[in-house]
Image (cartoon, rainbow, N blue to C red):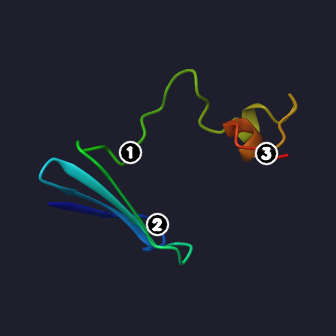
């Protein structure tokens, strides 16, 4: 079993018996999810995805992170 606490200590990944569980209580709303395979908790840099898009696109119409990720509700 592998337990990885995330920043802030309010959420964690638990890898157990080829399952990965995600537990989050960071917003006082308990959330649990699971996957039937282990996942990595590190994200490798993809060449087509800048590591700091807010800096890369600041002069090209950067609005905010929500807009960049396509979750802007405006």
Left or right, 63 with reference to 48: right
Residue 63 left/right relative to 41: right
Which residue is label 3 attached to? 64
How far is disc 3 from disc 2 in space, using C-alphas?
22 Å
The residue sitting at 21% across, 50% down in the picture is: 19
Give the residue at mark 2: 7
Residue sitting at x 30%, y 43%: 39
Crowd around label 3: few <14 · some 14–19 · many ≥20 (10 Å): few
**With 37 as the anchor, is 44 left or right in this view?**
right
Eyeballing the image, is 11 above or below 45?
A: below
Q: Which mark is residue 42?
A: 1
Between 7 and 55, the one nearer to me in the picture: 7
Give me the C-alpha separation between circle 2 and circle 1. Answer: 13 Å
Where residue 38 appears, as percent x and y from the top left, is: 24, 44
**Where is 36 relative to 24, above or below?**
above
Q: Residues within 10 Å of mark 1 (few under 14, many from 20)?
A: few
Q: Nearer the viewer, mark 3 or mark 1?
A: 3
Q: How many marks?
A: 3
Whether label 2 touches label 1, CB < 8 Å: no
| Label 2 secondary element | loop
Contact? badges 3 and 1 (CB < 8 Å): no
Disc 3 vs disc 2: Cβ atoms closer than 8 Å?
Answer: no
Q: Secondary structure at mark 1?
A: loop
């Amino acid at each position: 079993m592998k337990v990885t606490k995330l920043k802030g200590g309010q959420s964690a990944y638990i890898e157990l018996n080829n399952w990965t569980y995600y537990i989050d209580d960071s917003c006082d709303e308990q959330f649990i999810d699971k996957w039937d395979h282990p996942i990595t908790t590190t994200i490798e840099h993809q060449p087509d995805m800048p590591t700091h898009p807010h800096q890369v696109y600041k002069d090209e119409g950067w609005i905010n992170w929500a807009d960049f990720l396509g979750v802007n509700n405006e």
